[in-house]
Amino acid sequence: MRRPSLSIFVPAHNEAKNVEGAMQDVIVAAGGCCPDYEVLLVDDGSTDGTGEVADTLARANPRVRVVHNPTKRGLAAGYRTALDLATKEYFAFIPGDREINVASIRSIFEAIGSADLVVPYHANQRARAWHRRVLTRVSTGLINLLFRKGLRYYQGPTVYPTALARTLPSETRGFFFLAEMLLSALDRGCTYVEVGLLHQERAFGKSKAVTLSNMATALRAVFGTWWTLRVRRAQVPVAQRRPNTSSDRGA
């Protein structure tokens, strides 16, 4: 069976002590199941030497390309930058903090092609900090209620066909853009396979994902996406949602 080609986005902001290990994990996992791959490492305005580590990694491996943002632009902007540069068939996202076990990364990559989307979720929730577990449970429950879905996680590193990912909206500036993209893809009828991943605490530093500002942005984005996909669409007449065809008009 033909193995798909893969572009892998690795974001890093002040991850000088973590990014080399994260990159090693990505390269080992990709090399074992997706021989035709590239890694797009985005140094997001780091001030701790992450950029220098990234350049060293790129010099050692021609599959690695580095983008240096002079100032911090955020995960969503980095994602879009890497997506614009991607040259492969599928697009994946693995954080540069090394919080995903290498075996889990390989499981995610091995599932590519079994459905339109590969949707990872945390299989060992107890390995995460309690406040992150609570936030995940609340946000996932809210999304499933509002959108009548049953997924186990929406904020994970979903793998998309690159061409599809480029058409998905990501208006949210905060971390919730990942769920916004996934919900939009599901709304289009994309199939998916869920893959459990093993979380491991980072060796150095603290997670930057959970802040009061990010939580407020996420709540606004959840309801904004719900309004767009559920309420506004319901107000569009059925005749305008579906193009006329000969079968609609009859013989």
Image (cartoon, grey):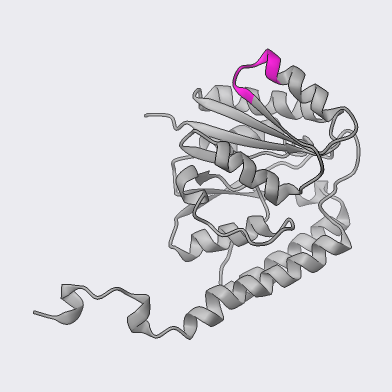
Tell me if 53 is positioned left or right of 39 in this view.
Answer: right
Percent across and percent down for residue 190 are: 45, 57
Q: Quadrant of residue 181?
A: bottom right
Residue 191 position (above or below residue 96)? below
Magenta stretch, residue numbers: 58-64
Residue 151 position (above or below residue 219)? above
Percent across and percent down for residue 159 are: 55, 45
Q: Quadrant of residue 22?
A: top right
Look at the image and say whether residue 60 sits in the magenta stretch.
yes
- Quadrant in which the C terminus is drawn: bottom left
Look at the image and say whether residue 187 sits in the magenta stretch.
no
Percent across and percent down for residue 199 are: 75, 42
Tell me if 88 is positioned left or right of 49 in this view.
Answer: left
Q: Residue at x 81, y 50 (%)?
A: 126
Q: Residue at x 76, y 17 (%)?
A: 56
Q: Residue at x 81, y 61 (%)?
A: 214
Q: How many marks?
A: 0
View extreme (left): residue: 251
Residue 13 position (above or below residue 56)? below
Q: Residue at x 49, y 79 (%)?
A: 233
Q: Nearer the viewer, residue 141 or 59?
A: 59
Q: Nearer the viewer, residue 243 or 196?
A: 243
Percent across and percent down for residue 156 are: 66, 50
